[in-house]
């Protein structure tokens, strides 16, 4: 898959019915993403960023058009296959972290590996590696309630990266963080993108994130108005 | 194996809420097993007492005998001859002759069934040996209920009047030689036990009997002309039916208890699904299919029953074990129960009862847990992630 697309959307449309009204969240979006990209979908609230992320994350289905992720047509995927795709190839990072409150940091990060059927020793090694990447190995036994916002988001990153997915989808990952934590987290993600060649796609309107991304896609009212390579990071490939 | 592990972890992680459900459900477990064990014990105890004191291994009845028709008694007697006589002489059976009479205690008229029994018999636990006393004209053994209703006590003498085989009325004084304490009302109320040879002479029914009680484990029963064999199923039928009816009545109590426990679990499940929508969304984002989320939540609910069984076992085994060993002292009003109960009732718990109850509660809990999870099947992952109800 080195030279092919990981994600490709063709005339992607998403319409939400609100009673008698219909709201067009995505209007003929055509985008492609290759391995190792560090891209951001930028736009104001209600522009369709999260909808796009949900569709390519196989959490939602398009109304029209096509979204192909890792060779799978999202519009044709049954629920079980969609879950399998997410399980094997996609990691999610959410604005509100979405950690499971009764599990420890270790258990939260371990969770995706349990679904993938890793052995206990493999899980332990992979979880500790992931926690090392996000500098939280010493908090493995803590509960999410004992962590700060920045730490929680780092746990969420470790959970997303632990299974070494091809794609990580991050929906406003810095929205609940202060500037210092935001930069710290973005540095970690940049590092992981470089080291593991994981494709990162962000949804954001946060300037701090925009400063780190290598490709900026501007989405307004469900339409791609601009798709540009950010030249302020010339050392980064995409 | 991941779902059971996660379900257990989630359930235990819910803390007090889980333990409240578990404790309530464990009460249902123990209450169901206790009440059912009590009725089973009651059935066994009553049956055993009936077998020991009245039924033996079954009874031969003279064909015209109908215990529910007092008018049949006049003709309900037959000769002990041939093989039947051999059976009695071999000690494998003991004859009982029943004659209707009247006693006049304290100037009152009271009907009485005079029951002749061999004072030497050892098949029944009735203390018939006291009737061997020859210094009395007609020694009689009565039960405590009969003593109470007639006002008779040991040493009292009372006139008894009866009609013999020829229809002639006669009278005699009988002397109370013992008042026996028995839990079996059917050998007590309205009856006086007298020596069989005496009663045969009095009624002009030499070598005759109304019933012949066989020894325990008697069988297979032979057919004797004029006699019908009544096995234990027949003789204990009323007891079994009565206990079954009382047992059904008691189920209302534990159905209510079980209903409350199920309601608590249902409520917890509904709340849990409502509160944990975001978690459900996260699970789906991490790769759980809807089916697996439903399995997880259903199993979480069903595990309440497993934990309840364990908690119930923790206090139920010592408690019920103690009651089974030491018995449950019954209040005085238990006499009104209508069946043979001793001063103490010993509950009986079988493996079938415990397993059946566990299975029943487990199935009901699983169904109750499954019902609210249907919402998950309709939940969109994107809505769930936002904590929104679909």
Image: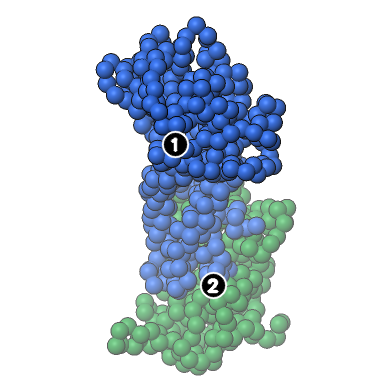
Chain colours: A green, B blue
Residue at screen point 58% across, 68% down: B287
Location of mark 2 (residue): A169
Residue farthest toward the left in the current orientation of the protein: B107
Mark 1 is surrounded, within 10 Å at the Cα level, by few (under 14), some (14 to 19) or many (20 or more) other residues, namely: some
The answer to whether B387 appears left or right of B305 in the picture is left
Is B367 situated above or below B46? below
Residue farthest toward the top in the current orientation of the protein: B135
Location of mark 1 (residue): B73
Q: x, y (%) of residue A17? A: 35, 85
Residue at screen point 51% across, 22% down: B201
Q: Secondary structure at mark 2?
A: strand
Chain under disc 2 = A
Residue at screen point 45% across, 76% down: A50
Mark 2 is surrounded, within 10 Å at the Cα level, by few (under 14), some (14 to 19) or many (20 or more) other residues, namely: many
Q: x, y (%) of residue B330? A: 41, 26
Is A137 situated above or below B73? below
Label 2, label 1: how many angstroms apart (C-alpha)? Answer: 95 Å
Q: x, y (%) of residue A129? A: 67, 56
């Amino acid at each position: 898959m080195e030279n092919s697309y990981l994600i490709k959307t063709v005339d992607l449309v998403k319409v939400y019915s609100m009673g008698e009204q219909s709201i067009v969240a995505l209007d003929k979006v055509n985008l492609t993403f290759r391995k190792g990209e560090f891209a951001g979908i930028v736009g104001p609230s209600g522009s369709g960023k999260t909808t796009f992320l949900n569709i390519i994350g196989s959490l939602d289905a398009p109304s029209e058009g096509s979204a192909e992720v890792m060779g799978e047509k999202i519009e044709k995927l049954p629920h079980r296959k969609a879950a399998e795709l997410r399980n094997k190839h996609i990691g999610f990072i959410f604005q509100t972290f979405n950690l499971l409150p009764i599990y420890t940091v270790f258990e939260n990060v371990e969770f995706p590996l349990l679904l993938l059927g890793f052995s206990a020793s493999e899980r332990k090694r992979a979880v500790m590696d992931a926690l090392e990447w996000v500098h939280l190995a010493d908090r493995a036994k803590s509960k999410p309630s004992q962590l700060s916002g920045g730490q929680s988001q780092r746990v969420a990153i470790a959970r997303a990266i632990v299974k070494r997915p091809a794609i990580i989808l991050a929906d406003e990952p810095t929205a609940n963080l202060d500037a210092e934590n935001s930069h710290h987290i973005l540095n970690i993600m940049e590092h992981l993108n470089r080291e593991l060649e994981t494709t990162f796609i962000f949804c954001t309107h946060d300037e701090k994130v925009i400063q780190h991304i290598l490709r900026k896609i501007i989405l307004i009212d469900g339409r791609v108005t601009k798709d540009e390579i950010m030249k302020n990071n010339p050392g980064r490939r995409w | 194996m991941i779902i059971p592990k996660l379900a257990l972890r989630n359930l235990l992680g819910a803390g007090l809420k889980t333990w409240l459900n578990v404790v309530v459900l464990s009460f249902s477990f123990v209450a169901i097993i206790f009440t059912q064990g009590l009725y089973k014990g009651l059935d066994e105890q009553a049956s055993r007492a009936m077998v020991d004191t009245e039924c033996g291994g079954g009874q031969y009845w003279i064909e015209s005998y109908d215990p529910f028709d007092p008018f049949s008694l006049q003709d309900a007697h037959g000769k002990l001859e041939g093989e039947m006589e051999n059976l009695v002489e071999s000690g494998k059976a003991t004859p009982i002759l029943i004659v209707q009479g009247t006693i006049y205690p304290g100037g009152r008229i009271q009907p009485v069934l005079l029951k002749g029994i061999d004072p030497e018999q050892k098949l029944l636990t009735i203390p018939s040996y006291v009737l061997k006393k020859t210094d009395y004209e007609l020694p009689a053994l009565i039960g405590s209920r009969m003593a109470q209703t007639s006002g008779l006590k040991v040493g009292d003498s009372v006139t008894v009047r009866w009609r013999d085989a020829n229809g002639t009325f006669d009278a005699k004084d009988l002397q109370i030689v013992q008042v026996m304490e028995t839990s079996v009302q059917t050998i007590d109320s309205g009856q006086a036990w007298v020596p069989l040879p005496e009663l045969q002479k009095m009624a002009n029914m030499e070598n005759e009997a109304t019933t012949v009680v066989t020894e325990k484990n008697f069988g297979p029963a032979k057919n004797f002309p004029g006699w019908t064999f009544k096995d234990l199923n027949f003789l204990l039928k009323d007891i079994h039916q009565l206990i079954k009816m009382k047992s059904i009545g008691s189920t209302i109590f534990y159905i209510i208890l079980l209903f409350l426990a199920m309601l608590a679990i249902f409520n917890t499940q509904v709340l849990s699904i409502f509160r944990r929508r975001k978690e459900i969304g996260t699970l789906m984002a991490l790769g759980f299919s809807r089916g697996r989320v439903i399995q997880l939540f259903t199993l979480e609910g069903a595990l309440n029953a497993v934990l309840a069984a364990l908690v119930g076992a923790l206090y139920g085994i010592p408690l019920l074990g103690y009651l089974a060993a030491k018995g449950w002292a019954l209040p005085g009003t238990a006499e009104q129960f209508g069946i043979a109960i001793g001063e103490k009732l010993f509950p009986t718990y079988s493996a079938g009862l415990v397993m059946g109850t566990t299975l029943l509660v487990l199935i009901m809990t699983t169904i109750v847990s499954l019902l609210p999870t249907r919402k998950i099947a309709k939940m969109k992952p994107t809505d769930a992630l936002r904590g929104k109800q679909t």
